[in-house]
Image (spheres, rainbow, N blue to C red):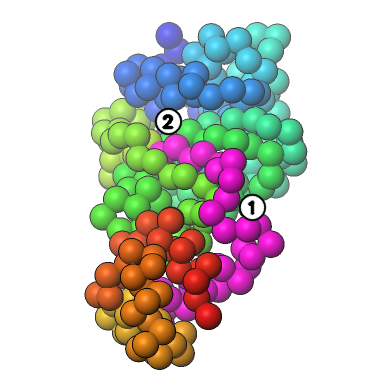
Amino acid sequence: MHTYTHSRHEHGQNFLIDPRAIRTVVALVARTEGPILEIGPGDGALTLPLQTLRRPLTAVEIDTRAARRLDRCTGRRTRVVEGDFLTHRLPREPHVVVGNLPFHLTTAILRRLLYAPGWTDAVLMTQWEVARRRAGVGGSTMMTAQWAPYYAFRLEGRIPASAYRPRPAVDGGLLTIARRERPLVPHTDRRAYAAFVHRAFTGPGRGMGQILQHGLGLSRREVGPLLGAAGVRRDAAPGRLTAEQWAALWRRAP
């Protein structure tokens, strides 16, 4: 198995070299269906094992030399594209995204994906803390809460820093994202719902009870039944709410 990459580090990527981590990623992708789009393949540490799934695979690599090297050793089902994923035209047809994300571009790539149509599942390696927060472990971020009605985020495991070259200062995390077949909030409400969550995260108050009163202008009499119907404690912090609780608050908020 190909487990080492000679690609340059100038694009800020820490390349995966651990066979066990690579097998875990491939196994997660194997649970999905459809063509595969890989972000930043480097010299193919993931690309070549992914080819064993015998599915169409497109690998988008920003490094010209790495793209040309990889293209020479891939099979007929694999297409290597030289380009920047952040500007690459993504397919609208169903597909699966996989990638070892450059740590400094994680947020930008995630935002690109979350706004993009077509893909059904993503298997991504990020910084450990980013993967935890996106999956809502120990509390979610505002970004996760805004997108949770449309995607299910799951933390699949921790990848030690020793699994990368060059070795990063922090461990990595393995995050999967699945597009919900039935969103918890209608897509037509997405912008208004996102604004609602933003006000909750940034509004005054120490718990959802105070936040709904002071930040959203609801009376105490309105807040009690609203929280009760959504199954939310009055003192709960916004980052502790589940996707279902946020959706229930949105549906019932005056």
Left or right for 190, reference 10: right
The disc label shown at residue 15, or none: 2
Q: Residues within 10 Å of mark 2 (few under 14, many from 20)?
A: many
Residue beneath the point at 51% across and 39% down:
178
Q: Amino acid at mark 1?
A: Tyr
Left or right for 151, reference 156: right
Q: Is residue 193 visible?
A: yes
Disc 1 element: helix
Residue 181 horizontal/vertical position (percent): 59, 41
Q: Which of the two discs, 2 and 1, sits closer to the camera?
A: 1
The disc label shown at residue 115, or none: 1
- In the rendered view, tell whether residue 234 sits above or below residue 74: below
Residue 204 horizontal/vertical position (percent): 36, 86
Q: Nearer the viewer, residue 23 or 253?
A: 253
Q: Which residues are magenta?
A: 175-204
Disc 2 element: strand
Q: Nearer the viewer, residue 171 or 215?
A: 215
Q: Is residue 168 visible?
A: no
Q: How many circles with numbers are drawn on the protein? A: 2
Q: Amino acid at mark 2?
A: Phe
Residue 190 drawn in magenta: yes
Residue 164 horizontal/vertical position (percent): 35, 31
Residue 78 drawn in magenta: no
- In the rendered view, tell whether residue 204 sits above or below residue 46: below
Left or right for 4, reference 79: left
Left or right for 222, reference 151: left
How far apart are labels 2 and 1 at the CA level? Answer: 26 Å
Using the rendered view, name the quadrant where residue 96 is placed. Answer: top right
